[in-house]
Image: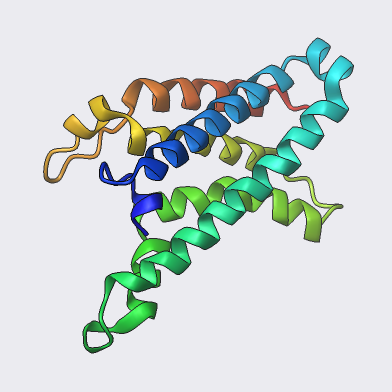
Amino acid sequence: MEILDGSPRQKLSRYVEWLITAVVLINCSAVILDSVPEIHADHKEFFHELEFWSVMFFTLEYVLRVWSFGARFKPEEGGAWRGRKSYIFSPFGLVDFFATMPHYLHVFFPTLDLRILRVLRLLRILKLSKYNTAGRLCRAPGLWLGSFPLADLNHRVCLADAFRGRS
């Protein structure tokens, strides 16, 4: 569990943080570039493959986090399911879930027009606030500012992509 939590005592944990950060940045950059019609036309297959493998990566990360949170509570404190439920309904758990959900909805309901849900893919950028030391300083009790500049950029790109209206 410490490996996924960013423990400073675990060298492997730092590598996992860097890997997740790199995948998030690559993926969000690709989503932004894919929203440019000329770039999309030339590299549609590449962006599709990158999105597929990113979703697989984030799904694996989500499953591992849900599973590992089961170790946080002893059986007399509610056990594994209490820990798993605490992650699933935490802000980061919800971001992880909603960032991958559009892909799975499209797989199970391919005829539905889910363009508006594509903006949820950029929620992945909020994952960076977990690994951003400056963002941690902004999270005082009752305050969750995390990565406000990144969230603002995310919001603007999402709106631009949603109003562009292309699938």
Q: Nearer the viewer, residue 157 or 60?
A: 60
Q: Nearer the viewer, residue 22 or 152?
A: 22
* Number of numbered labels in the structure image: 0
Query: How is the protein colored in the picture?
Result: rainbow
Residue sitting at 45 percent across and 64 percent down?
66
Query: In the figure, residue 105 lies in which quadrant?
Result: bottom right
Q: Is residue 146 above or below residue 34?
A: below
Residue sitting at 41 percent across and 33 percent down?
128
In percent of width and height, residue 26 lies at: 60, 25
Q: Is residue 167 above or below residue 64?
A: above
In percent of width and height, residue 46 lies at: 82, 27
Q: Nearer the viewer, residue 15 or 162?
A: 15
Image quadrant occupied by the C terminus: top right
Q: Is residue 167 visible?
A: no
Query: In the figure, residue 32 lies in which quadrant?
Result: top right
Image quadrant occupied by the N terminus: bottom left
In percent of width and height, residue 113 lies at: 78, 45
In percent of width and height, residue 144 lies at: 24, 39
Q: Residue furthest left?
A: 141
Q: Residue furthest bottom?
A: 76
Q: Nearer the viewer, residue 136 or 114?
A: 136
Horizontal arrangement in the rendering, residue 2 relative to residue 47 (left or right) = left
Horizontal arrangement in the rendering, residue 107 relative to residue 5 (left or right) = right
Query: In the figure, residue 17 lies in which quadrant?
Result: top left
Horizontal arrangement in the rendering, residue 47 relative to residue 150 (left or right) = right
Q: Is residue 126 visible?
A: yes
